[in-house]
Amino acid sequence: MPLKKAEKDQIVADVAKLLEASKLTVVARYKGTNVKAMQTLRTDSKTSGTNIKVIKNRLFKKAVEASSKFKDSDTSALEGMLLYAFNAEDEVAPAQNLHNFAKTNPNIEFVGAFTDDGQFIGAEDVKHLATLPSKDQLRGILVGTFAAPLSGFVNVLAGNVRGVLNVLSARAEAIKE
């Protein structure tokens, strides 16, 4: 059943709002991916705050035109069966979600992405973004970097104490014999 004009206008408005709020909107082909796999992708992506939508390209292009940030964006690559991954919280999460999903479902293929400043970046750039560590991983690396000198210093101090204890233990054993 075809959509009515009011329904189409509502979809365009919703997509424009998602696009404006999203830090990165990834576009990918999904031809050949079954419904169950798409449901799994949507469920897995929600944990990182990523919203996966399948929208008609014509309606998405209208949403891009309706958006103030994206009016001048290139939409010529938006052809075929496409899905759109929006995320308002994390810049790389949509790319990572699709990249991880594509490992088990090779039908997913990056087309490009819209950045929060209105630029359209190519598929290769999106692949590079997908391989970056997540925010939590970067925080862990940063904490480890800050903690490394301190833990090294503690180990040096403990080494002297261990050396004294080893000497005392050896002396105690020698006295017992």
Image (cartoon, rainbow, N blue to C red):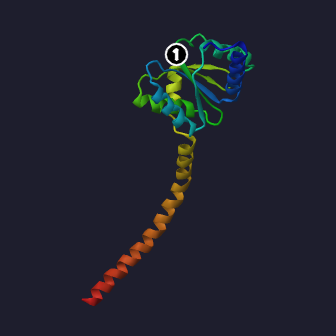
Name, please, the residue furthest toward the bottom: 176
Name, please, the residue furthest toward the front: 1
Q: Amino acid at mark 1?
A: Met
Q: Position of residue 163 (x, y in %)?
A: 39, 73
Q: Looking at the image, is 125 positioned above or below residue 41?
A: above
Q: In which quadrant is the N terminus drawn? A: top right
Q: Position of residue 150 (x, y in %)?
A: 54, 60
SS for tag 1? loop
Residue beneath the point at 55% across and 43% down = 138
Name, please, the residue furthest toward the left: 177
Task: Name the residue beneath numbered marker 1.
Answer: 81
Q: Position of residue 164 (x, y in %)?
A: 40, 77
In the figure, residue 27 lies in which quadrant? Answer: top right
Q: Looking at the image, is 156 positioned above or below residue 77?
A: below
In the figure, residue 32 lies in which quadrant? Answer: top left
Viewer-side residue, 136 vs 97 = 97
How many neighbours does mark 1 have within 10 angstroms: few (below 14), some (14-19), or many (20 or more)?
Answer: some
Viewer-side residue, 18 vs 116 = 18
Residue beneath the point at 59% across and 10% down = 76
Residue beneath the point at 55% across and 11% down = 79
Total of numbered circles in the picture?
1
Name, please, the residue furthest toward the right: 68
Viewer-side residue, 155 vs 3 = 3
Viewer-side residue, 57 vs 148 = 57
Tell whether 152 sits left or right of 169.
Answer: right
Q: Position of residue 162 (x, y in %)?
A: 41, 73
Q: In which quadrant is the C terminus drawn? A: bottom left
